[in-house]
Image: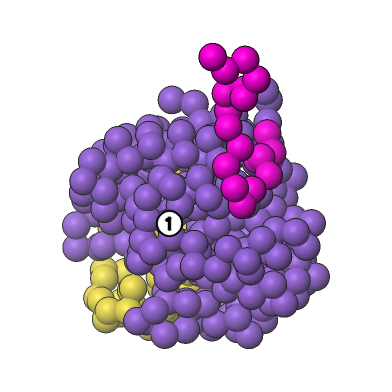
Chain colours: A yellow, B purple
Amino acid sequence: MKLVLNGEDRTFPGLGTIADLVAHLELDARKVAVERNLEIVPRSAYQTTVIADRDRIEIVHFIGGG
Amino acid sequence: MDGSIPGGDTWTVAGRTFKSRLIVGTGKYRDYAQNAAAAEAAGAEIVTVALRRVNLSDPNQPMLVDYVKPDRFTFLPNTAGCFTGEDAVRTLRLAREAGGWNLVKLEVLSDTRHLLPDMEETLRALKLLIADGFQVMVYCSDDPVYAQKLEDAGAAAIMPAAAPIGSGRGIQNTLNLGLIIEQARVPVLVDAGVGTASDAVLAMELGCDAVLMNTAIAEAGDPILMASAMKHAVIAGREAFLAGRMARRTYADPSSPRAGLI
């Protein structure tokens, strides 16, 4: 499946949910936030939020800033 | 390392009470370890943080939260890099999901060269954020008129720039800052422009509730030592404000009595 992930076109093997994507990317779900097609995906909904081909996904975290 | 002022002096923003009146940023440090050490040396209880895309090509790179820990510091997510109200709302919704809190720092910038706030857009963004349930500390210009508008719109704190972000020029308009402090019924913090400890002392002597700084510590020759200096500066300025300074005189007034001279 194709996703626009953090602004880049990426191809993935079939992924079912946001939880699958986060696990595939080897990210710690407690340290990131996810937006799917401009809507926040609450951490509690990663398992139940189904992703579709061409979805636009943003995965962000806190970094240093002033 | 405790940034508290002796005598149990505290300040409260959006219902949360803090002992340290120094908020530090987490940008521009050599690494996150130095960053964490500086925040400790500053005695800070609040740190500002930014929100950015995860580097997916290297998921093992160091993460801020592994060094500057959210259970040790209150994270104050910012909207650095946002130029519209919609950008700010989107960023802080993600920050709220990442961190689970709603106390945030709004900054809507204009020109990338001077990074001064776009106040019209800042006020619009503030209203959007408040409608979305956020408690908002607002980076703003040192204009008392706009500061009042922000407060009227529900800002949790007013945070005028002393000078442009990262310029280290110190407080450029003490008169305006004084007017903002005098009229405000919410905390006023100097945010941006502090260069060295005396700038922080002056801000606190003028009656600011707290000072927010990043570059003055991060770009000091020894950031940890400067963090400690800033801690003492904020405490000294606060104590001087509470003590009440002596009156200014035009002419000298000898400290030793004139009577009894031989």
Which residue sits at x=72%, y=77%?
Answer: B145
Which residue, as the protein is rendered here, is positioned at the far front?
B262
Task: Measuring from the top left, give residue A8's x and y in whole percent.
Answer: 27, 79
Residue B210 falls left or right of residue B231: right
Q: Where residue A24 appears, x then y in whole percent?
A: 29, 57
Location of the C terminus of chain B (image quadrant): top right
Q: Nearer the viewer, residue B145 or A37?
A: B145
Q: Residue under label 1, please give it.
A: B194
* Magenta span of residues: B243-262
Percent from the top left, x then y, of residue B192?
46, 62
Point 48% across, 48% down: residue: B200
Does the magenta-highlighted stretch encompass residue B246? yes
Q: Nearer the viewer, residue B119 or B154?
A: B119
Residue B17 or A12: which is nearer the viewer? B17
Q: Which residue occupies 64% across, 48% down?
A: B249
Q: In the image, what residue type sits under mark 1?
A: Val
Q: Is residue B162 above or below residue B216?
A: below
Give the structural element (helix, strand or loop) at label 1: loop
Quadrant in which the N terminus of chain B appears: top left
**Foreground residue, B215 or B203?**
B203
Can residue B259 be seen at all in this image of the molecule? Answer: yes
* Secondary structure mainly formed by the magenta segment: loop
